[in-house]
Image (spheres, grey):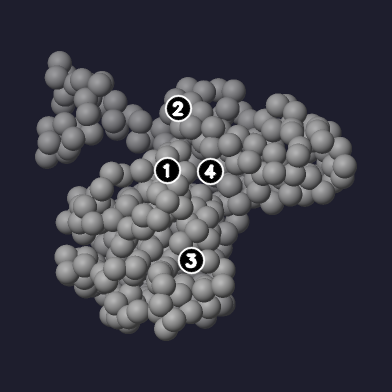
Amino acid sequence: MPIFDKKDFPKVLAQVEQGSMASLYLLYGEDYLVKSALAQLTEILVPESQRSTNLEIVDGNQADFRQILDNVNTFALFGGRKVVVVQDCRVFYSRANLPTLYLKSKEAHEAGDLEVAARLLLEVLAYAGWSLTDVADGAWREIPTDLWQQTTGVERDQAEVAWLEAVVDHAGSTGMEVPRLRDDGSLLETALQEGFPEEQCLLLTTDTVDKRRSLYRLMEKKGIVVDFGVASGSSRKVRSQQEAVLKNLAQETLSAAGKTIEPQALALLFERTGFNLWAIKTQLEKLMSFAGEATLVTREQVEGLSDQFREEPLYELNNAMATRDCETGLLVLNRLLDQNYHPLQLLASLANELRRLLVAREFIEEHLAGSWDPNISYGGFQKTILP
């Protein structure tokens, strides 16, 4: 079956409304978009009057996939469609995903979502074979530098992992534990090959997939896959893509209440929240409440909410220096200082970034002289440069 992009999701909903239900749906990518799509899809798949008996929702972090597959193969008590939903499933998590999971944990912390940040970090610890005590109270300093970088994809320095201890403290104080490793992927792959009974449906959501695995290719073949991913980073292209998603969310939220927003107000709101759809949604709801019966949300109303909703991530300062973006760099620097970052911490981060740039420049000029192609693909880089 075809893979759908997020903008094509209405086509998936239309198919279900016309009576065509797949036996498997996989929704993956940005958390807010995935959860919103899940709510829309389940609303159409299972009528409200049948949801108590024909809809099961399972937390993927605590899921027993043997039991889940048994439930999918068991008919609903009073007949009709039966849908089993596994939220935040872990079937694609593996050691190969550790740098991605580590980065997502960091991004969740920067967005203020300690629960998600802790859950993702615990997955990293599980696949790395580490415990909470291995990284708590500064114990991460005892992990060999090369092992740390291989596992997380980043250098082991104070500036890079300053956020880590807050997430570890949250996990410990709330009783969260490192999950046990399971081979749920093999169980699911076997079940998909055998197929599910008619009118039975398995619906999976996750933040990441591994398109190289046979499980993912089988899902493409047997079910419907929808990609809700949004690029991350600070390049102009990425920012443009993120702003398009944010504008679409703002338009949907405001138009449902019969309201619009001034372009300057929307730009200021984006600047203050960053790419955080949950935060944007919350702030838009506040603005609609403040606006009352007025149909236009103004810049003055946005200014009245708060000076800043997000914490500026430290890596954006490094990115600005690496891309020679002085204007953005100064803006980020001022915000980091406002967030009580110590000047020496910021200087150390910039020094580390400059050191990496100098090493890369020396490698290009001395070892790749005459053979370096700035337009080389990532695949070509892996084959010709990394070895």
Q: Gap between marks 1 and 4, in whole Å?
A: 40 Å
Q: Residue at x 20, y 56 (%)?
A: 218
Which residue has dot 2 on it? 237
Residue contact between numbered discs 4 and 2, judged by CB atoms under 8 Å: no
Residue contact between numbered discs 4 and 3, judged by CB atoms under 8 Å: no
Q: Gap between marks 4 and 3, in whole Å?
A: 45 Å
Residue 185 image offset from top left, x and y in percent? 24, 67
Label 3 crowd bin: few (<14), some (14–19), many (20+), radius 10 Å:
some
Which residue has dot 1 on it? 11
Tag 3 secondary structure = loop
Q: Gap between marks 3 and 2, in whole Å?
A: 39 Å
Residue 344 image offset from top left, x and y in percent? 57, 43
Tag 4 secondary structure = loop
Nearest the eye: 71 or 303: 71
Label disc, if present, on residue 233 of the rendered structure: none
Q: Residue at x 28, y 56 (%)?
A: 223
Picture quadrant where residue 90 is located: bottom left
Label disc, if present, on residue 46 of the rendered structure: 3
Amino acid type, residue under disc 1 in the picture:
Lys
Tag 2 secondary structure = helix
- Eyeballing the image, is 127 above or below 10? below
